[in-house]
Amino acid sequence: MKTFRDLLIWQKSMNLVTEIYQITNSFPKEEIYGLSSQIRRSSISIPSNIAEGYGRNGNTELLRFLNISISSLFEMQTQLEISFNLKYITEYQFSKINGESRELERMLSAFIKKLKDRR
């Protein structure tokens, strides 16, 4: 791999951010500084931390940032469920993005495990 852009987990997390932005565009205006902002920030944190960790020295730093990334993913999943419970998103939207986020979760977990096993 030459850059973080070659990582499939980064690519999938970038797609997820785009979908989150599209979905949150329809949230109520009173949520612009609340749930909408929070879910966007947590989703942005996922690829950002993958990229930052990749740019650091060694697997120890990469692992640290991957763990931050997966924590942000869990935060985003929780906020997504809250959005669904509040009926800000449809069942279809929730199922689709939740499925994609769960796939990313499995991929991140596997990558973290692989790096830990190398130590």
Image (tube, helix red, strand yellow):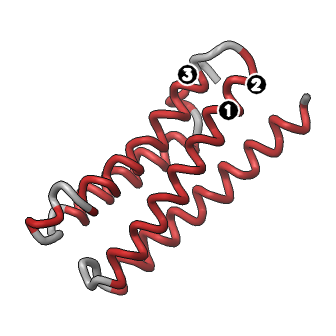
Badge 1: few (under 14), some or many (20 or more) residues near its Cα, within 10 Å? some
Q: What residue type is labelled 1?
A: Arg
Q: Is residue 39 left or right of residue 4?
A: left
Q: Are marks 2 and 1 in contact (CB under 8 Å)?
A: yes
Q: What residue type is labelled 3?
A: Thr
Image: 19 above or below 52: below
The residue tagged 3 is 3
Q: Are marks 1 and 3 in contact (CB under 8 Å)?
A: no
Which of the 4 quarters of the picture holds residue 35? bottom left
Q: In this view, does 62 lie to the left or right of 38?
A: right
Badge 2: few (under 14), some or many (20 or more) residues near its Cα, within 10 Å? some
Q: Disc 1 and disc 3: Cα gap in Å?
A: 18 Å
Q: Which of label 2 and label 3 is nearer to you?
A: 2
Which of the 4 quarters of the picture holds residue 118? top right
Q: 8 or 34: which is nearer to us?
A: 34
Q: Percent x, y for residue 37?
A: 25, 53
The residue tagged 2 is 60
Q: Which of label 1 and label 3 is nearer to you?
A: 1
**Which residue reaches farthest top?**
57
The structure residue drawn at horizontal position 56% and vertical position 31%, both measured from the top left corner, is: 6
Return the disc, 2 or 3, that comes first in the chain's sequence: 3
Quadrant assignment for the C terminus: top right
Which of the 4 quarters of the picture holds residue 22? bottom left
Badge 3: few (under 14), some or many (20 or more) residues near its Cα, within 10 Å? few
Quadrant assignment for the N terminus: top right
Q: Disc 2 and disc 1: Cα gap in Å?
A: 6 Å
Q: Residue 64 carries which label?
A: 1
Q: Which amino acid does label 2 sit on?
A: Thr
